[in-house]
Amino acid sequence: MNELATSKASLKEQLPVLKRGHLWIMSLLYLATFGSFIGFSAGFAMLSKTQFPDVQILHYAFFGPFIGALARSAGGAISDRLGGTRVTLINFVLMAIFSGLLFLTLPTGGVGGSFIAFYGVFLALFLTAGLGSGSTFQMIAVIFRQITLYNVKLRGGSDEQA
């Protein structure tokens, strides 16, 4: 790491990157998936404790982030086979469905609710957040590889040079 040259570019020289549409789209997609994972990790135990106070959530809380972290690499592998765009789209639809289902598992006015259903839906949300994180990360490599190939060929280079 010590041999790497430091960036000497001024802020003005770096600003043109903000004009790239792919950068903004991928940033928002990744924020939505990885940000959801972080949010679920932070809020799961707290929401569990407020809605289901009789449950010792500390016995179960780590499973969600664990599943999400494992699912990230699976999301990338699935995206390599089926395409990152397709996997990400399906994943967002599933995240929306599970988010809606979560409300059906909560008690109303302190009555009812099902912790088992709540826990299962939350685990599914962790799974989809991890899969989505992997699929969007896979898309970044594909998109920017294509852009690099295009720019190299535009200057007379070959695929190997890219």
Image: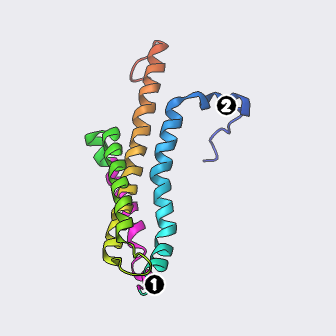
Taking the magenta stretch, the answer to whether it contains residue 36 is no
**Image height of 42 relative to 9, above or below:** below
The crowding category of the residue bearing disc 1, from other C-alpha atoms within 10 Å (few below 14, some 14 to 19, many at least 20), is few
**Which of the labelled discs sits on residue 15, or is there none?**
2
The structure residue drawn at horizontal position 42% and vertical position 85%, both measured from the top left corner, is 56
Range drawn in magenta = 55-76
Q: Badge 2: how crowded within 10 Å, few (<14), some, or many (20+)?
A: few
Q: What residue occupies the far front of the structure in this picture?
A: 109
Q: How far apart are marks 2 and 1 (CA)?
A: 50 Å
Report the side of 151 relative to 1 (left or right): left
35 is higher (above) or lower (below) than 116: above
Residue 70 seen: no
Q: Nearer the viewer, mark 2 or mark 1?
A: 1
Residue most toward the top? 156
Q: Residue at x 46, y 44 (%)?
A: 29
Which quadrant would the C terminus be assigned to in this image?
top left
Q: Residue at x 44, y 16 (%)?
A: 153
Residue under label 1: 53
In magenta segment, residue 66: yes
Q: Is mark 1 on a helix, strand or loop?
A: loop
Place of residue 118 in the rendered image (x, y in percent of width and height, measured from the top left): 35, 72
Residue 59 vertical position relative to residue 129 in the rendered view, above or below? below
Apparent side of residue 92 relative to residue 144 in the rendered image (left or right): left
Q: Which residue is drawn at 33% across and 66% down?
A: 121
Amino acid marked by disc 2: Leu
- Dominant SS of magenta comes to helix
